[in-house]
Image (cartoon, grey):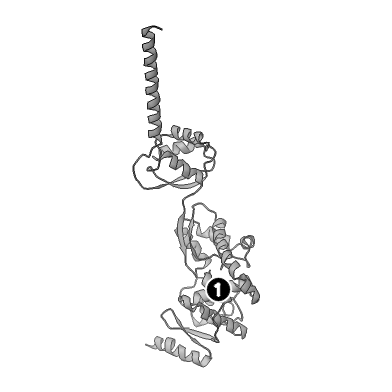
Amino acid sequence: MSRSTRWILLGSTVLSLAIAASAVAFVRWSLSPIVASGPTTLFWVERGDSLGEVARNLEARGLIRNAFVFNLLARYRELAGSLRVGEYELSAAYSAEQTLDRIVSGKVATFAVSLPEGLTAAEVGERLEAAGLANAAEFRASVTTPATAAALGVEGATLEGYLFPETYRLPHRLSADEVAKVMVDQFLTVWREIEPMARAQGLSMREVVTLASIVEKETAAPEERPLIAAVFRNRLERGMRLETDPTVIYGIVNFDGNLRRRDLEDASNPYNTYKIAGLPPGPIANPGAEALRAVVNPADSDYLFFVSKNNGTHTFSKTFSEHQLAVDQYQRRRRTR
């Protein structure tokens, strides 16, 4: 081999190595984060999106440096067909490999919504809509459809009472039925704990939930729930009407916040427990775990009455005469001041 030929081969080798080194450097650069640190942003992988489409969209959004190299990475790792549909929190501060791992993990972005004890189904729908997690009208239609309640395994024609109070983290684009199922499943978890006690006392799921919903609406003091439950159970056992304002209010269409005497005398309201005996037709709100437990494990007491002390708590009485004195002290005198 001539000297000139050897120089040509050496030059070609050096050039090839230089090109290879440049290619490796380019790939490493392409896979590296675009910025050292930065906020996350939401990115959707839509149903039917190909790997190429996802890669191009990521590059267009400034979340990866190079769509072609991202595509090669996914194929090299044999993940080209593993991208999961959903909404992801991504950042330009993530490497291409971190971004790929998130998209194939299926760990979609979730958003918090807090549902305190005692909300009605309609109020739950409003909170979900405010959080951007459901349309209130669609949610209301779902939870008032008898087929939905039957499919989810609860007693009654609607899901009122079974939308368990909790702080949930939910992804966007769940259907109203899917959102409702999350809440009912949480209720059923608690119900399985207390069901043996309920059955032993001859109480059905619907009876427990209905009474618990009344207990929930009657007190803001958690420690009073067993006492409130005891009062109502004592009244039911003695054949006394429950005579509770929250049930009446629930049965009034477009209640304006002012409960009037005529409302308490309206026998056409099926939730008017001043006129009807026993429990109302169904739950009037969605009770939490402590209210449910209070119904199956009420306080051991002979109380039959209670009246608000206007500070979120109540005073309890065993006789009507004692109750009248308490009403005079906390309600009538207050109205005359």
- The vertical placement of 53 against 205, above or below, is above
- Give the percent coordinates (x, y) of residue 177: 57, 57
- Give the percent coordinates (x, y) of residue 231: 55, 83
The answer to whether residue 234 shows anywhere in this view is: yes
- Give the percent coordinates (x, y) of residue 305: 52, 86
* Quadrant location, the N terminus: top left
* Quadrant location, the C terminus: bottom left
Q: Which residue is mark 1?
A: 293
Q: Residue at x 39, y 9 (%)?
A: 5
Q: Residue at x 41, y 34 (%)?
A: 66
* Amino acid residing under circle 1: Arg
- The vertical placement of 20 against 283, above or below, is above
Q: Of 126 and 234, which appears nearest the observer? A: 234
**72 relative to 12 in the view: left or right:** right
Q: Of 65 and 95, which appears nearest the observer? A: 95
- Give the percent coordinates (x, y) of residue 34: 36, 39
Q: Of 184 and 25, which appears nearest the observer? A: 25
